[in-house]
Amino acid sequence: MSEIFKPVRVAVNVMRARLTVIGFNIAIVSFQLPQLYGQSGGIELPGMDHAVHVTANAALLMALALSFCALVTFIISGSLDEVGFCTHWSLVAGDLLMYLGLAHTVAGFFAPLGISINIFATNLSRSASEISILHAALSVTGGAAWFLAIYVGPAVSLVRSPFDRRINIILGIAYLLLVLVLAWVTLQAVRIEEMGLDHPPNWIVGMLRELVQPLRW
């Protein structure tokens, strides 16, 4: 007796929960972008009344774009009928984009924070040990959130995906390629901020560093 093919039907509430996460992420990014103007560090440019945090701005803007892409991808995964089950593999693609957007939001928060803490430590040398502990704690927790969002979350989504294995493999490869492309884009922003260094990291080292970005913070 041949096996009866059962189509994938994911409850619409699964997709709605993810849309809520994306909505919060968009709100957080929209709030954080103006806050960068008042943070120390960054590049001073003539004609601008605030320093420019190239890497943090790039991360937050990419987080915003990825979140909107995930939003659209989730919406098109639902059937246009009276029930609205999610039946298309774009549901998993939306998951991957959502996690990538969250990772860039974390990077946009914690990357400039490390610079600010270093400046703070320079001005308060008496509290250097306490500040170093604070810096380490924030870097570890922020780095853990980044690794969970960019690697663990997508891996779990692909493993638990109810769709065909071939589709999941293709989505996994596409996600890894997108991570590499965005790491290369982030590297351009980092190199802009590190123009004043005598020996900036080469391309290979820079790319490897962006794949474990919290070590740079």
Image: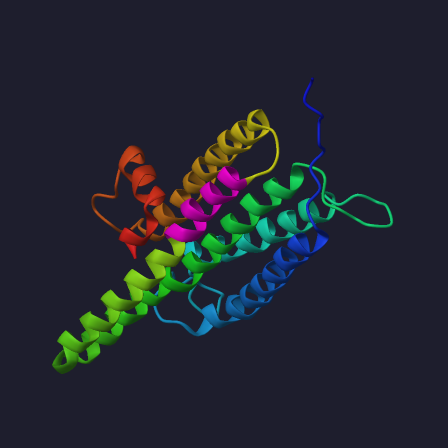
Residue at the image position 46 percent from the left and 34 percent from the top: 176
**Total marks placed:** 0
**Figure colour scheme:** rainbow
Q: Is residue 114 above or below residue 94?
A: below
Q: Observer-nearest residue: 50 or 139? A: 139
Q: Observer-nearest residue: 47 or 116? A: 116
Q: In this view, does 51 lie above or below 188?
A: below
Q: Observer-nearest residue: 193 or 102? A: 102
Residue 104 image offset from top left, x and y in percent: 47, 53
Residue 26 horizontal side relative to residue 52, left or right:
right
Residue 161: quarter of image? top right
User: In terms of secondary structure, what is the magenta stretch mainly?
Assistant: helix
Quadrant (top left/top right/bottom left/bottom right) for the N terminus: top right
Residue 190 image offset from top left, x and y in percent: 36, 49
Quadrant (top left/top right/bottom left/bottom right) for the C terminus: bottom left
Residue at the image position 69 percent from the left and 18 percent from the top: 2
Residue 33 image offset from top left, x and y in percent: 52, 66
Q: Which residue lies furthest to the front in this view?
A: 1
Residue 151 horizontal side relative to residue 74, left or right:
left
Q: What segment carries the magenta color? A: 147-160
Q: Does the magenta stretch include residue 88?
A: no
Residue at the image position 41 percent from the left and 48 percent from the top: 189
Residue 24 image offset from top left, x and y in percent: 59, 65
Residue 17: quarter of image? bottom right
Residue at the image position 42 percent from the left and 41 percent from the top: 183
Q: In this view, does 135 lie above or below 143?
A: below
Q: Residue furthest top?
A: 1
